[in-house]
Image (cartoon, rainbow, N blue to C red):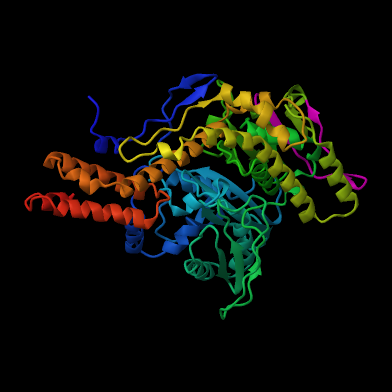
């Protein structure tokens, strides 16, 4: 028996289906991180009721000072805020990841980045308005922390070991690599002189910063310097020009404009592998297991972050560890030989890993940059069988064959730029533009096909369940490539179809598809709410029983709560109109029933 139309309109849509080679894949979708999240108003009220550090915690989880203790080894000396809840496992990981291993021989000051998995059982981070509005590549991590490290090792005769060794670490869920390392360059040298009181003052200053808000230009004061930053928004045009510096109307010093909060010097990161950039891009796109072995934590962490960013604006949905050590809690998980290597990208410095990772399919061994005349010497692609335990020479050890041909024009342009002493920033801009256009050429046909799966707006009516997004058929998509494929926007030739078919098996496709499907479903939910508000629901209630009216009220309320939890892009007046309708309907019911419905 069919549902009464106004009750049909409130039924939930079904789980998305994904067609693999023409057949539906009925595996359950991952839990939507938006489920269970309260309304923005309620969340703001909760935030206001919490103790201090509210603004601080929108930027950082905590600040740690890690030192070397003769009896304990690496140990956390200080944590701010002092009441931050880190598990013992997280503290241990931070300790080990905050020091370069003994093979790096880092003297003086060293900066690098790590990323660690948060402990099982920790209350997971709830997706917020920031993540709704931020680009996919800059969203807050929900299950990992980044650690931004400033490590100092200098000779000190007053210490038993003969060396002063200490790290200042900013722990955050935000992938703001350039911003946080810029902050460390300002505060760390002074911290090593003034210690705890200085650090407390810095944390109090960060607690005065405005919240990171996509699309906004913010002034962030820290130790007498004002950093002016632009927080990117997902509505920004990829590769667009940065916003110009805003005028300074406050009594603070003139701000220092940071050109980016997250981008790296790509040219510096890739200068010894420029001729293999196409291969590395494909390996990242496909989420292949890859290890980068480098002489220092700085080089390995920057290389990993540069590789992950190479497929932007597509989000890298596999695990990645910019700096990984044998003490890491996932060491056994990632180095087992009883199963295929996981989809993870690791940066290491310890030569011991050469033996450990011999069964991995792709290993990039970097050495110190050597020049061949004016040009940086390019590493060669080598067979995995040539990967030796000791004294392994720099190279890319893999049997991978690229689907697409190299872009020789790009390589010539970059090499000519080196000879002409073109600044690294300009070389990086050329690289970033090339990688962006390459990724866009690949993703635009997918976006175009996905948009064709969206039901027409006129099919959304108040008296029916919201229509569903049509299932994604790989075969149907492949059939569209002859007329709407990457060849329309890219000069690169090769087996694009083979690359797509391989991409369909990767975590990056799964992550992209689920995100797009969620956004389209929410758009349909928003349109459905608007059509409900425009319908004559009051007229419908006139000849309906009390039970039917109560059922309608409860289901409308459920829809309203869901809209606020998921922070649907619905105008406030639509939600307010639905609220007012519910209240007027409740007011028309018998007085003994009204308190029961108002209490729910």
Residue closest to the eye, 139 or 193: 139
Q: Is residue 405 above or below residue 150?
A: above
Residue projecting furthest to the left: 592
Identify the residue at horizontal 65%, vertical 58% (top origin). 260
Can you say whether 441 is above or below 156 in the image? above
Q: Main secondary structure of the magenta part?
A: loop
Relative horizontal placement of residue 184, taking residue 405 as reference (left or right): left
From this viewpoint, which residue is outermost toward the bottom? Answer: 251
User: In the rendered image, is residue 103 in sight?
Assistant: no
Q: List x then y, in percent, for residue 189.
A: 64, 66
**Is 491 covered by the magenta stretch?**
no
Q: Position of residue 322 (x, y in %)?
A: 62, 43
Whether residue 254 appears in this view of the structure is: yes
Number of numbered discs visible in the structure rendering: 0
Q: Is residue 116 left or right of residue 577?
A: right
Q: Horizontally, is 58 left or right of 343 in the view?
A: left
Residue 178 position, x and y percent, is 64, 56
**Does the stretch in magenta take in 365?**
yes
Q: Which residues are magenta?
A: 358-382
């Amino acid at each position: 028996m069919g549902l009464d139309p106004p009750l049909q309109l409130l039924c939930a849509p079904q789980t998305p289906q994904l067609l693999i080679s023409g057949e539906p894949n009925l595996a359950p979708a991952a839990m939507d991180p938006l489920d269970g999240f309260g309304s923005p108003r309620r969340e703001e009220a909760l935030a206001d009721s919490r103790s201090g550090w509210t603004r601080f915690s929108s930027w950082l989880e905590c600040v740690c000072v890690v030192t070397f203790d003769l009896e304990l080894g690496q140990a956390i000396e200080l944590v701010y805020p002092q009441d931050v809840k880190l598990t013992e496992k997280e503290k241990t990981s931070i300790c080990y990841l905050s020091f370069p291993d003994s093979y790096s021989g880092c003297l003086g000051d060293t900066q690098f980045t790590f990323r660690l998995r948060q402990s099982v059982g920790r209350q997971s981070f709830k997706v917020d308005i920031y993540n709704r509005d931020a680009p996919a590549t800059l969203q807050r991590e929900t299950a990992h922390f980044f650690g931004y490290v400033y490590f100092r090792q200098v000779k000190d005769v007053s210490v038993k070991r003969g060396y002063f060794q200490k790290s200042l670490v900013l722990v955050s869920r935000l992938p703001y690599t350039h911003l946080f390392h810029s902050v460390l360059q300002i505060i760390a040298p002074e911290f090593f002189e003034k210690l705890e009181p200085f650090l407390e003052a810095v944390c109090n200053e960060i607690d005065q910063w405005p919240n990171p808000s996509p699309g906004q230009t913010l002034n962030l004061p820290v130790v007498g310097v004002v950093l002016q930053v632009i927080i990117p928004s997902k509505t920004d045009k990829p590769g667009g020009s940065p916003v110009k510096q805003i005028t300074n109307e406050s009594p603070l010093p003139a701000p220092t404009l940071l050109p980016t909060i997250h981008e790296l010097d790509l040219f510096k990161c890739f200068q010894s592998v420029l001729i293999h950039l196409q291969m590395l891009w494909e390996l990242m796109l496909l989420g292949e297991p890859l290890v980068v072995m480098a002489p220092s934590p700085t080089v390995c962490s920057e290389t990993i972050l540069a590789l992950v960013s190479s497929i932007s604006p597509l989000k890298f949905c596999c695990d990645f560890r910019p700096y990984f050590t044998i003490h890491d809690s996932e060491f056994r998980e990632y180095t087992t030989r009883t199963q295929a290597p996981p989809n993870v990208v690791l940066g290491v410095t310890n030569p011991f890993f050469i033996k450990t990772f011999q069964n991995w399919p792709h290993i990039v061994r970097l050495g110190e940059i050597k020049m061949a005349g004016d040009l940086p010497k390019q590493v060669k692609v080598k067979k995995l069988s040539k990967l030796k335990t000791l004294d392994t020479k720099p190279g890319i050890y893999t049997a991978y064959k690229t689907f697409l041909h190299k872009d020789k024009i790009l390589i010539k342009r970059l090499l000519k730029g080196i000879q002409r002493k073109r600044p690294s920033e300009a070389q990086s801009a050329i690289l970033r533009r090339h990688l962006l256009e390459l990724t866009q050429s690949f993703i635009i046909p997918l976006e175009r096909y996905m948009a064709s799966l969206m039901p027409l707006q006129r099919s959304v009516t108040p008296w029916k369940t919201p229509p569903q997004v049509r299932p994604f058929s790989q075969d149907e998509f492949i059939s569209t490539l002859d007329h709407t494929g990457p060849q329309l926007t890219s000069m690169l030739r090769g087996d694009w179809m083979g690359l797509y078919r391989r991409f369909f098996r990767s975590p990056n496709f799964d992550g992209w598809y689920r995100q797009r499907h969620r956004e389209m479903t929410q758009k349909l939910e928003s349109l459905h709410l608007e059509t409900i508000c425009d319908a004559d629901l009051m007229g419908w209630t006139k000849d309906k029983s009390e039970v039917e009216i109560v059922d309608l009220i409860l289901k409308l309320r459920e829809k309203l709560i869901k809209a606020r939890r998921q922070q649907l892009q619905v105008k406030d007046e639509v939600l307010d109109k639905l609220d007012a309708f519910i209240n007027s309907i409740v007011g028309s019911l018998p007085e003994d029933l009204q308190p029961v419905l108002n209490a729910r």
